[in-house]
Image: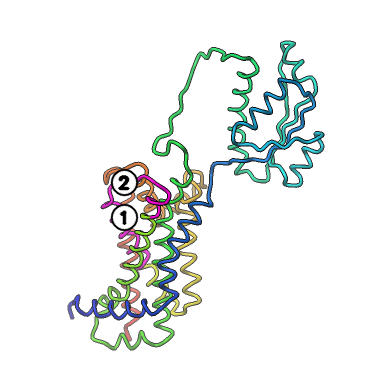
Amino acid sequence: MSFRWSRAAAIAQKEMYHVLRDRFTLTLALGLPVFMVFTFGFAIEFNVKNVPLAVHDADKTQTSRRVIDTFGSSGYFLVDPVVSPAAAQQAIDGDRSRAALVIPGGFQKDLLSGGVAKAQLLLDGSDNSTVGPILGYVASIEAIASRRIADFDPPKPIEIHTRFLFNPELNSRWFVIPGLAVAVLAILAVLLTALTVAREWENGSMELLLSTPAEPLEIIVGKLAPYAVLGLVGLAFVYVISRTVFALPFRGSHVLFVLGGILFLATYLALGLLISVLTRRQQIAMQLAMMAGMIPAFLLSGFIFPIASMPVFFRYLTMVLPARWFMTIARDSYLKGSTLVEMGTAFLALGVLCVIIIAIAARKFKKDLEP
């Protein structure tokens, strides 16, 4: 029997009626993208700011005050004077400060005598994500304070000007929000598909559906089509909110962005179908869907942690994860304006993974239906 679109459309229409009556599915599909964009957009900030800094100034001179004022006016530190070096240490121990600056007596005297004025900076190393940025701030503040104290800019034999491409202000939202397209599609596609089809097995309605003249491929297309639409709606929500609320630029091709989204969506819909066929239980399907959909999308796709910084094994592992490649497409489309040639590797890898996972899911689904 040949594939007929009319039968697939009839199954898709029936599935859409189920979706419209299922409040959980609608809430998840329509509310999750909005919730994630607003939560991650406003909450995640990779630029370390407002660092509590305990300061003990034993010198109490004009020079020491200039150093402290430079820290306070930088916008990165919140200066909190303390009465002793021990109090500065206690502020870090009690999590009231992330760093402490201790300026010893004789600071200005050492400087005026032609020596080197020394101060001590203590950092809380328990949160190593903040140590690197703070050290970078301190290096800049040290240079600014030296110029203020000397009242002139010393000549520089070499001068390097830094320019940040694609994200000039290093805005964390510009980095995070395009990646949410990956997380939203991954969660919606694999979770909704796995739960819905598994529920059909539990309720016995799948056996009823299989008794119809429809071919397995027609059933697959009909069952997954409504969730493909919901996934694209979720992707549209992310795009609209990112452009209107967060004012993100979009420098690339909308056609390439949507094409990448469709490839990624098809891959994860097939993955959800495969999970449902293997488990046939909603509880187990949800657990596997979370492991296969959410964890790779958040942890191994480059969404938060750079892939180049991962151990060698995990860098190679990410190559077989569709989320890694769509993350590249999404960010390059938003920020770089990359062409199809420049994103060719990502599209090729995503296309190959899409074909492989769809083929495995369809084969397993068809085999599972055979008596």
How far from the left and from the top, in percent, is residue 352? Answer: 31, 57
Displayed quadrant of residue 34: bottom left
Residues at badges 2 and 1 in contact (C-beta under 8 Å)? yes
Residue 94 on the magenta span: no
Residue 246 on the magenta span: yes
Label 1 Cα crowd, 10 Å radius (few <14 / some 14-19 / many 20+): many
339 on left or right of 205: left
Displayed quadrant of residue 53: top right
Q: Is residue 194 above or below residue 72?
A: below
Foreground of the two, 47 or 61: 61
Q: Earlier in the sequence, mark 2 or mark 1?
A: 1
How far from the left and from the top, in percent, is residue 133? Answer: 58, 37
| Local secondary structure at mark 2 | loop
Q: Is residue 147 above or below residue 231?
A: above
Q: Quadrant of the C terminus?
A: bottom left
Q: What number is the disc on residue 343? A: 2
Q: Residue at x 50, y 75 (%)?
A: 284
How far from the left and from the top, in percent, is residue 186? Answer: 41, 62
Q: Is residue 324 above or below residue 119?
A: below
Check disc 2 and give the amino acid type.
Met
Q: Residue at x 50, y 56 (%)?
A: 39
Check disc 1 and give the amino acid type.
Gly
Cα separation between marks 2 and 1? 10 Å
How far from the left and from the top, in percent, is residue 359? Answer: 31, 67
The secondary structure that most of the magenta stretch takes on is helix
Q: What number is the disc on residue 170? A: none
Displayed quadrant of residue 93: top right
Which colouring convention does the figure follow?
A: rainbow
Label 1 sits on residue: 260
Q: Which residues are magenta?
A: 241-269
Q: Quadrant of the N terminus?
A: bottom left
Q: Residue at x 78, y 25 (%)?
A: 104
